[in-house]
Image (spheres, rainbow, N blue to C red):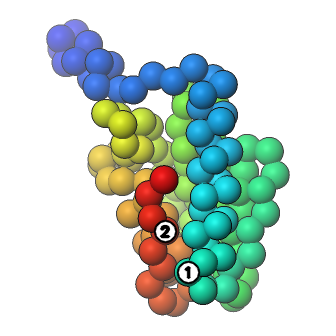
Amino acid sequence: MAHLKQKSRRAQTIMNETEFLRYSDQLFAHIEDQLDQCGADFDCEHNGNVLTIEADNGTQIIVNRHTPNQELWIAAKSGGYHFALRDGEWRSTRDGSGFFAMLNEVLGAAAGEAVEIEPL
């Protein structure tokens, strides 16, 4: 069992705190820019560690960073999702799904139409 834990740790990409904060700030700005370009009706508010995205119908999606664990979190009507950087990609800590795939899914559900945010 110890061997599996050690192997799992090696697969995780490590950033220092400054790099993580810089990346997540860039990610929040990227998401806002992509939403502006895609034509879906969303309002965004970035406040500290949280990006709040509100659809025209009032549905909210929260994207935030959890600095101590270096994770990105998405909160939506369908649930809460945690993502950690693994081998250069943000993957769900639960099932390995990708951050942008999940973000597009919850945004599409809120908008009632397909939404495609390109990976950063």
- Does 35 sit above or below residue 22? below
- Residue 93 is at least partly visible in this image: no
Residue at 26 percent across and 13 percent down: it is 6
Pick whichever of labels 2 and 1 is earlier in the sequence: 1
For the view shown, which residue lies furthest in the right direction?
Answer: 47
In the image, residue 67 above or below residue 108 = above
Residue at the top extreme, as displayed: 2
Task: Tell me where residue 2 appears, x and y as whole percent.
Answer: 22, 10
Image point 66% across, 85% down: which residue?
41
Q: Secondary structure at mark 2?
A: loop
In this image, 57 relative to 92: left or right? Answer: right
Q: Nearer the viewer, residue 39 or 94?
A: 39
Residue 35 location in percent, x, y? 61, 73
Where residue 117 is drawn, which disc sits there?
A: 2
Q: Residues within 10 Å of mark 1 (few under 14, many from 20)?
A: few
Q: In the rendered image of this protein, does residue 113 appear above or below residue 4?
A: below
Q: Disc 2 marks which amino acid?
A: Ile
Q: Pinpoint residue 52: horizontal percent, then vertical percent.
A: 72, 62
Query: Which amino acid type is marked by label 1?
Result: Cys
Judging from the image, what secondary structure is the residue with disc 1 in?
helix
Tell me residue 115's x, y (percent). 48, 79
Instruction: Quickly name the residue at label 1.
Output: 38
Q: Is residue 87 at all visible to an observer of this figure? A: yes
What's the residue at 60%, 86% (across, down)? 39
Q: Is residue 110 above or below residue 26?
A: below
Q: Are marks 2 and 1 in contact (CB under 8 Å)?
A: yes
